[in-house]
Image (cartoon, rainbow, N blue to C red):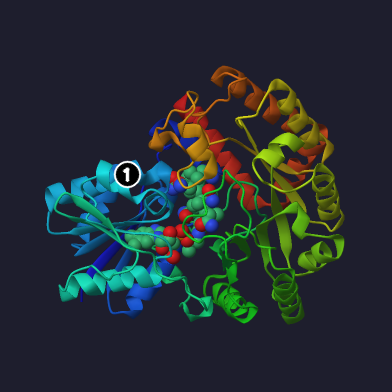
């Protein structure tokens, strides 16, 4: 039996000095790898998963763990922020055991396969787009030795030439996929957590209920799953959730979909099924403000919805139009109020640093953030990821430093004409401070802590680590 090791490479933004932050971050595993693992296991491979990112493994620990398995194949999953680390791992593997074949998949290679292969010679093969079938057929073709010409979605080298084959069609019926192989994760669910205060009670798990997003926002990389919305049936999801409860005692789910509420009829069927069956589970999801209404939110609450993250992006109508977000500010305020009314926590996801950003649009964003009854704020710097429209635009701009390993939304690597990096960083700190330093928010967090011993111990762990580093 051939062994294949699937790796989620260490995060680029991690360093030992930041260890006191570890108790606060989310460490849920990569669902892409879990799904690939389940399919490959069914094809007779011995599959191991190394979740370096989630478990906080260093580069050398990751390498050691990979080599210990003595694999034939190593599959690395990468975003733009993690591709450098993935390439470093591929290189180190090749230096020790050149006969191990290295594969790369995920959003980064899908968005810019040629540039990725040009820059990183230690990736032997790449897979673009949806991976389950493409990877399986690529492995079979390699093992049969008959050439890769007709192998859809494969990226490989022929001498000096980089070959990028046409993409496979998407899987029409997602229910044909086996459940993600949570059982292959060492220490699941114990070591895998939602971010601090994003739940009351664990253990938690992530699930993805759909693929693809029908929207055309210019900052979002849809290269892997495209614009067509496909989803698992509510029966499949119900069975998966029941399995996670029964097998692992999962109490809280995080839906990793881009658009959990994109199909109202399907969401209604799902919520009714969960509520009817009395399945006691809490869950978080992401939604657009124009996909929800008061009745739907009440039903979601009945089915266990605990928190909804709304992608709002900016408080400036001009910026929202420029990025093709296609939402209005009154819809944002309405959705936030309805969510609170339904008894669900509301998180606002915002970015700053758009090409059209000015001091005035930053003030509009602050004003919207403070007007809406959000419980939590997630603020990032606009990052032009490969695969997005904004990336093409930014590439022509002097304000863009294309440093892949720093492109993780925490670094300010793009600044608009009207604002410097310093001004953006100052605005970032100001927005966070003005949102959180309000009695309503402080009391709400204290209330959550009072109801959640798990989050209290995470807080205590973070504080004691911080004190030890001082
Ligand atoms: C959940 C999620 C997270 C979780 C990750 C949890 C985890 N451990 O994976 C958290 C919150 C930690 C996270 C963090 C970040 N994320 Co994120 N995240 C997502 C999200 C919403 C879902 C991912 C998912 O589970 N998809 C479902 C699975 C089934 O799909 P998949 O992972 O793509 O895997 C399939 C294929 O890509 C392929 N494949 C994947 N890996 C491999 C490996 C091999 C060998 C092969 C052959 C195939 C293959 O096959 C899989 C099955 O079909 C996606 C958007 C999306 N819709 O995918 C964004 C997304 C991946 N994230 C993104 C980004 C930018 C980030 C951050 C950099 C910044 C941020 N937004 O916070 C960080 C850093 C991540 C890092 N690795 O360094 C971007 C990536 C864009 C890019 N070009 O890099 C995405 C695409 C969002 C977007 N639309 O712009 N993220």
Q: Is residue 455 above or below residue 156?
A: above
- Of the pair 355 and 199, the residue shown nearer to us: 355
Q: Is residue 98 above or below residue 296?
A: above
Pointer 1: residues within 10 angstroms few (<14), some, or many (20+)?
few
Image location (x, y in percent) of residue 42: 35, 80
- Of the pair 220 and 74, the residue shown nearer to us: 220
Q: Is residue 97 above or below residue 431?
A: below
State left or right for residue 470 relative to residue 352. Answer: left
Residue at (76%, 26%) from the top-left corner? 363
Image location (x, y in percent) of residue 186: 38, 63
Q: Secondary structure at mark 1?
A: helix
The reply to whether residue 442 is visible in this rendering is no
The quarter of the image holding the N terminus is bottom left
Location of mark 1 (residue):
115
Image location (x, y in percent) of residue 58: 33, 43
- Of the pair 443 and 63, the residue shown nearer to us: 63
Q: Quadrant of residue 120?
A: top left
Residue at (39%, 65%) from the top-left corner? 167
């Amino acid at each position: 039996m051939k062994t294949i090791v699937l790796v989620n490479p260490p995060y680029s933004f991690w360093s030992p000095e930041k260890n006191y932050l570890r108790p606060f971050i989310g460490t849920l595993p990569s669902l892409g790898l879990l799904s690939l693992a389940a399919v490959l296991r069914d094809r007779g491979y011995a599959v191991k998963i190394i979740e370096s990112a989630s478990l906080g493994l260093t580069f050398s620990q990751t390498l050691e763990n990979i080599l210990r398995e003595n694999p034939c194949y190593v599959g690395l999953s990468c975003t733009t922020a993690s591709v450098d680390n993935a390439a470093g791992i591929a290189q180190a593997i090749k230096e020790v055991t050149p006969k191990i074949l290295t594969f790369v998949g995920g959003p980064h290679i899908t968005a810019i396969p040629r540039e990725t292969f040009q820059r990183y010679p230690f990736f032997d093969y790449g897979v673009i787009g949806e991976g389950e079938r493409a990877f399986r057929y690529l492995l079979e073709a390699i093992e049969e030795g008959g050439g890769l010409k007709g192998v859809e979605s494969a990226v490989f080298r022929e001498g000096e030439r980089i070959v990028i084959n046409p993409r496979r069609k998407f899987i029409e019926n997602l229910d044909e996929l086996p459940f993600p192989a949570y059982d292959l994760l060492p220490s699941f669910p114990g070591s895998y957590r939602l971010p601090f205060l994003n739940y009351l009670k664990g253990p938690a798990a992530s699930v993805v209920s759909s693929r693809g997003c029908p929207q055309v926002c210019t900052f979002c990389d849809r290269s892997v799953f495209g614009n067509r919305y496909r989803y698992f049936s509510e029966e499949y999801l119900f069975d998966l959730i029941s399995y996670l409860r029964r097998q692992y005692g999962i109490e809280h789910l995080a839906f990793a979909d881009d658009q959990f509420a994109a199909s109202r009829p399907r969401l209604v069927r799902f919520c009714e099924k969960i509520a009817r069956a009395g399945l006691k589970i809490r869950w978080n999801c992401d939604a657009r403000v124009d996909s929800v209404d008061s009745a739907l939110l009440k039903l979601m609450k009945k089915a266990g919805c605990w928190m909804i993250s709304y992608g709002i992006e900016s408080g400036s109508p001009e910026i929202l139009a420029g990025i093709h977000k296609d939402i209005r500010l009154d819809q944002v305020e309405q959705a936030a109020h309805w969510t609170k009314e339904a008894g669900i926590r509301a998180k606002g996801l915002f970015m700053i640093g758009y090409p059209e950003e000015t001091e005035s649009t930053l003030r509009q964003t602050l004003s919207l953030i403070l007007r809406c009854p959000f419980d939590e704020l997630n603020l990032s710097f606009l990052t032009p990821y490969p695969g997005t429209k904004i990336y093409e635009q930014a590439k022509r701009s002097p304000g863009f430093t294309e440093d892949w390993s720093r492109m993780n939304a925490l670094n300010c690597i793009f600044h608009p004409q009207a604002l410097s990096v310093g001004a953006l960083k100052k605005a970032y700190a100001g927005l966070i401070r003005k949102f959180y330093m309000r009695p309503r928010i402080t009391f709400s967090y204290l209330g959550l802590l009072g109801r959640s011993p798990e989050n209290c111990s995470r807080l205590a762990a973070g504080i004691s680590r911080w004190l030890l580093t001082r």
